[in-house]
Image (cartoon, grey):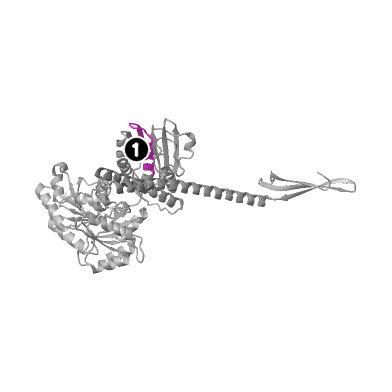
Amino acid sequence: IKLGGSVSHIAEREHAKSNERKYFTETVYHVKAEDKHKFIIEISDRTNEFLARQSLEEALNIAKNANQSKSTFLANMSRDIRTPMNTIVGLCTLLQRDVDDTEKRDDHIKHIVLTSRHMLTLINDIIEMAKVESDDSTLNVTDVTIEELVKEINAKVAPLVKAKRQSFKTVVAIKDEKFIGDKVRIKRVMMNIISNAVKYTPDEGQIEFIIQQMARPSRKYMYLQFLVKDNGIGMSEEFQQRVFEPFTRENTQASEGTGLGMAIAKNLVDLMGGTITVQSKKGAGTTFTVSFKFPLSKISDTSFWVDHGVTRILVVGGNNIDNNSVTWAMRKTDVTTSFAKNTKTAKTSIDKALQDGKGYNMVLCDWHGETETCLQTIRDLREVLPEYVPVIVFGDCEWSEVEASAIEAGANAYLAKPFVVSAFKECVQNLKSTDADGIVYDVKKKSNLLGMRFLAAEDNELNSMVLCELLNMVGASCVVKPNGQEAVEEFKKSPQGFYDGVLMDVQMPVMDGYEATRAIRACDHSDAKIIPIIAMTANAFTEDVQKATDAGMNAYLLKPIDMNKLEETVAGFKNE
């Protein structure tokens, strides 16, 4: 050090007493006094200053990384949306050119629909990602039965593996059958993983789905582990570190899809308090492991029936043993079960229920005795029942022998004796399913909507025009009002039976769809309690469906309008 100069440096040491890390500045000054060289050492504690600066630097880095991630996400999202949009715009141009060439025109329309559905899937995935990441996602907690969960997943997987001639094996090793969780989101996680396994496993490959219950340290919880194993193309070690990031796809020939499936799965697993891991090797397959801790079921089984619009059922038949078995089985469901020993009593009960605005959601008709007598009972019930109320044949007959006659008489499904709640649930699910068989609507077929008249609440002029044209195409008509208030006023002044149904948008000015539905149900119009009200909205989350049900709506359809689903749903509510 030069005379009169100084040297400083920052040091870090562990405090002798508290064992805390301390940061300080040491400065050494060189001075000369009385012909002697002296060194003065100054030590200044800078711990708080250093930690504050360190926190600011970390926050700055996090912000920079977040901005970079956001920019990357938006860039990927823009690319993935523009790609199908480019296809749709191009095909529309070709459609104008080939409008007179039937073969080419139909091919263009088919590919427009396919591409539109891919784009809709991408948009739904982006919304799901945003909703979970913004902590705006609400778990819909219900009783979940392992058997039902497996059946529903297998039903969705079956056509996927069949198309690629793959082997799909399910193994279930559990002790407890019920737990409390969000079944919809559990299925979403597993379907995202399994569909990826199908996609990245060659034709005739093997996929295994395992559900096993782990040893539990608490009597109140069920520890479940879901494994999906495949012998597909596998992943590199480097890609495994990024597989749960949005828009991440490894550079392979099979790299189609939105690139959001695993990111959504990870977010949903985190939301439900679980863990998800992956093990893979290039060319040797992949194993995903998802682990959860769920409370064991102790709540009554009510949510399924509310979700499927089943609150009151009527059992028609004089067998007390059967009646008692239904009562006992349904005792924890909050479903009101009524009985009628014969057709005359049943018709009286149905008429009174409709007059009180509390009609039955389903009728179980005991199939007992002569075939013609049973068929006549169904015909008699159909005289007083709205068509949208299903009649379920409840019996121990050979269904295949009487099915055609029973359906012609007005039956909708068959439930075998003895009465089992899980079997009844499956029957209800099959009846309530709105999945169309095809992806393109057949405009040449005779529509079940022919001659029907609808009241629609829709504030978007273009959407109104499209809805009216689609209904006109199948021989139906529609009166559109731009908000909920005007729709309510229009309904109130309409004659009895004038409208066959109400198509209700949810988000509208003046009065939204929920308020409008409640207003219609509460008014003194003779059709107020029985007219079908169907939500037709872009709100795509579970809680929105529940809000619609609570408001008094009968069904829930998502935009964009799918004519197959619209016809299937609306036709079920058509009165004779």
The residue shown at (37%, 37%) is: 199
Q: Tell me residue 428's x, y (percent).
A: 25, 49
Q: Helix or strand or loop: what does disc 1 sit on?
A: strand
On the rendered image, what quadrant is the C terminus found in?
bottom left
Q: Tell me residue 491's x, y (percent).
A: 25, 66
Q: Is residue 341 above or below residue 288?
A: below
Q: Which residues are magenta?
A: 189-210
Instruction: Spot the residue most to the top.
Output: 283
The residue shown at (15%, 55%) is: 382
Q: Is residue 190 magenta-colored?
A: yes
Q: Tell me residue 480's x, y (percent).
A: 28, 63
Q: Is residue 261 above or below residue 201?
A: below
Residue 71 visible in image: yes
What amino acid type is highlighted by mark number 1?
Answer: Val
The residue shown at (31%, 51%) is: 304
The answer to which image quadrant residue 136 occupies is bottom left
Tag 1 residue: 172
In front of the other: 328 or 268: 268
Q: Tell me residue 159's x, y (percent).
A: 29, 39
